[in-house]
Amino acid sequence: MTRHCIALAVLSLLTIFSYAQPSLPSSFQAKTVHSPEGADIFVRWGGTGPVVVLIHGYAENSDSWAPLAADLMKDHTVVVPDLRGIGRSSKPTGGYDKKTQAKDIRAVVTALGFDRTFVVAHDIGNMVAYAYAAMYPGKVERLVVMDAPIPGIEPWNTILLNPGVWHFNFHGPDAERLVAGRECIYFDRIWNDFTGDPSEPDEATRNFFTASYAQPGGMRAGFAQFTAFSTDAADNKVFEQVKLTMPVLAVGGEKSFGTLQAVIMRHVAINVQEAVVPRSGHWLMEESPVYTVKLVRQFLDSPAAAIPVRTTADKDGGETRLTPGEFKFPQQGNPGTGSSGVGGIQTVVLKGDPNETGVYTIMLRVPAHTQIAAHSHRDDRVATVVSGTWRIGYGDKFDESKLKALPPGSFYTEPPGQNHFAETGGEPVVVQITGFGPSSTVGENLIDLLAGLLTP
């Protein structure tokens, strides 16, 4: 789709915020909060009820949350800040690492008189939200992250090698000069590359956000979000050592991150639910607002999410004896660390912790008619088939001809870093796996997904 560029003459603040779309509810209050970290954060809020903080991503600002904010304000207090350097927040020279921006968010929450909140994030907002949840775990009731990686968290290094994320490394003074006056061309490339619907975001939305970033210092500040990624990765490696315990909903667009979002979050959290927005690319609020709003609302309002069940018999490495009837699987799927990450898998931790250093044993119940794409784990593992017929093979791609049927009592290995794949037939399969943590999962379907969707 051919789009005209916005003339520089219309890039005044008055014109920037006169576009009809998108827009948060007009009833929202607004103020600017000074963060002790050296930024003035513009924030809007409205509604009544439990507090929800919405953290936007790159190529957008807080107005991107318009559909979700309008729905949640019916029975929630909705707090919607502009990240530092974006929208109507100030554009300081530094502080764009996500740890510092998490402190900005905390300053906003407390300045408005709030404390413990729900947090919902998208894109780079995920990175700020993760830092916030890691730094203030007792202040986050539930966390929703949507369609973006977390620096330093697997498969981060693989993502960085993909040419589709060229914009991660496009920053600095030369980049600023190249984009100046051509902001619409730059952002159109990003919006087009990551959408599942070429008509979204629409023309008015693109013009609105382009004008916002074309303010003096706007692109410098925007690029600084990416410049900070190496710092973010180092910070997140430290955060990762203590897993998040609050319920987490990991949402991916079917034509974008898909189930990869949940795989990423299972490296850093123990209580992760996954959801995929059908037919949507990266821009969930623009491409599929009704479906996405419903997902988020159901999660915020639902009872506590299932987590990997730990048997009560495991007492600090002491004596444990369990009969098959004593394996207590959760009532819903909870594919946790050490599993393939496929939805519907139920996990029981029998001993140890696959997130931590040391020996662990987990038991997985895999639903009938489940196909698991090639994937690998970082640790060396051995496994036994407890019930059902498990069809497993080794290789970098799922290959029916390489599968071997393993009946109950069979033994197999999962060497570190070696891809394997599997499927079940007409009955569920239970397998018991022992490894030496910390474990992780990187899968063929996830990397292929990135290669196909992030390549221009």
Image (cartoon, rainbow, N blue to C red):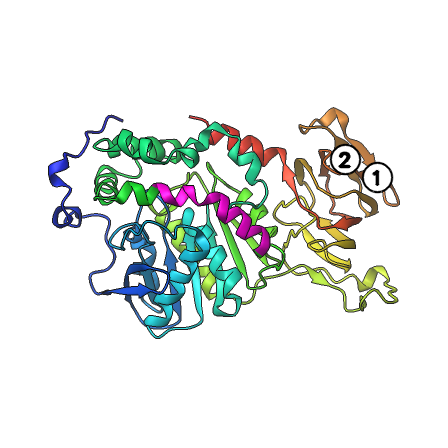
Q: Quadrant of residue 238?
A: bottom right
User: What crowding class fits label 1: few (fewer than 14 Cα within 10 Å), some (14-19), or many (20 or more)?
Assistant: few
From the viewer's side, name the closer residue of 302 and 84.
Answer: 84
In x, y percent, where is residue 272?
Answer: 57, 55
Q: Is residue 135 visible?
A: yes
**What residue is shown with label 2?**
392
From the viewer's side, name the closer residue of 308 and 82.
Answer: 82
In x, y percent, where is residue 12?
Answer: 13, 45
In x, y percent, where is residue 178?
Answer: 28, 29
Amino acid type, label 2: Ile
In x, y percent, where is residue 342?
Answer: 63, 45
Circles 2 and 1, Cβ within 8 Å, touching? The answer is yes
SS state under label 2: strand
Range of magenta residues: 223-238
Q: Is residue 352 above or below residue 422?
A: below
User: What crowding class fits label 2: few (fewer than 14 Cα within 10 Å), some (14-19), or many (20 or more)?
Assistant: many
In the image, is 423 to the left or to the right of 194? right
Q: Magenta stretch containing residue 160, yes or no?
A: no
Distance from disc 2 to disc 1, alpha carbons, whole Å, reads 9 Å
